[in-house]
Amino acid sequence: MSKKKKNYKITIPVARPWLGRTERRYVAQALASGWISSRGGFIDKFEARFAGFCGVKYASSVCNGTVALHLALVALGIGPGDEVIVPSLSFIATANAVAYTGATPVFADIDSRNWCLDPSKIEAKITKRTKAVIPVHLYGHPAEMKPIMKLAGRYGLFVVEDAAEAHGAEVEGRMVGGIGDIGTFSFFGNKILTTGEGGMVVTNNRRLAEKMNILKNHGMDSRKKYWHPVIGYNYRMTNLQAAVGLAQLEKAGKILAERDLIRRRYDERLKNIPGITLPPAETWSRSVCWLYSILVGNKRVRDGLLSLLRDNGIESRPFFFPMETMPPYRENERCAVSARISARGINLPSAVGLTDREIEKICAIIVNYVGRG
Ligand SMILES: *Cc1c(COP(=O)(O)O)cnc(C)c1O
């Protein structure tokens, strides 16, 4: 006899989009206008406003965060035979986008203090083939951009920031995404700002901006209709998605403030508990709370906690796996810090709307469990 699988009802999800009247009004306007594909007023407004949000000259919308990375790499001329350095710990799309170009992702270890690409681990991975590096601002905390930019400058590497999880985060007063040659964002349903599915590429370089605009639109010459000097893609966002995005962007300050509050409540309750490491907060950074993330003592405690939370109707997630351990990218050389942090990490519910009582309930379960070892 097989044991019946228990049917857990999730009452507190890890993430939930915060949609309101303005989103509905703008989508209704887009529908009424008839502009439901990739042209229309909301696209232009969303892109202009997002450029302002990031403090960059150019922003171009695309249909998701994965193609944003691919588009950026293609625009930089990266292709077969090239190598691109990526952090071991990220969502798989960071490495996949490199693979789509025909280039090889090369995995470098992360910094134990901020869980992002460790600048001191990059140099050993640079070869004659290395063309670019992709720092990822993981779980809302920025990568250490200053030494990364310096190193990239010294070796002539392009820098693409994967800011899919960090809308609004800053490094020494500069918004992430606008520091490297190109920054990419995702607006998936669980991200800080959402359009359902969607993404954005940002840059201060006019030539790169023009190149990405052509590539995402079937490679069509911007002045000569149906003339295609290069092989492009259809990576465009729709005006309906941009309508949602504009509404989200108009309340971005409020979303970030609400998430800061959630993080502070968790921090208050979980600080000074032996066996719990709080999310990073480097002095040179302003991080944002995408998914409130902690480390516990070891993998056994982490996995126990995941299932105990689920038994209580609380959704949580394990950290990503080190990417070099997965079948398409299997490498013998493993990233030790990434492996250690990956096994001990857990993402907790972080949606706007999460109540103090819910946070208290989640923390009580965690503190009690970790306390028992
Ligand atoms: C979500 C995410 C992506 C991919 O974005 P999609 O919009 O889901 O394609 C890329 N990189 C990181 C780090 C992400 O978290």
Image (cartoon, rainbow, N blue to C red):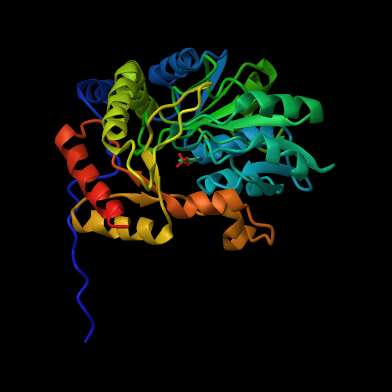
Nearest the camera: 90 or 36?
90
Q: Nearer the viewer, residue 118 or 167?
A: 118
Asked whether the viewer can see residue 225, the reply is: no
Name the quadrant of the C terminus.
bottom left
User: To which quarter of the image does residue 218 belong?
Assistant: top right
Q: Quadrant of the N terminus?
A: bottom left
Residue 220 point in image, percent of width and height: 63, 29
Any part of residue 27 in sight: yes
Q: Tell me the residue at 41%/33% (across/down).
A: 187
Q: Nearer the viewer, residue 140 or 131?
A: 140
The x and y percentages for residue 147 are 68, 26
Task: Tell whether 207 sits left or right of 344.
Answer: right
Across and down, in percent, residue 247 comes to 31, 20
Residue at the outermost right position: 128
Which residue occupies 43% across, 14% down? 49
Q: Is residue 6 above or below residue 342?
A: below
> Residue 36 appears in which quarter of the rendering?
top left
Residue at point 55% right, 36% down?
136
Can you give x and y, in whole percent of width and height, for residue 78 in the image? 73, 38
Quarter of the figure with residue 289:
top left
Residue at the left extreme? 357
**Horizontal placement of 16 versus 66: left or right?**
left
Along the line of sight, the residue nearer the viewer: 113 or 193: 113
Total numbered labels = 0
Residue found at x 29% / y 44%: 14
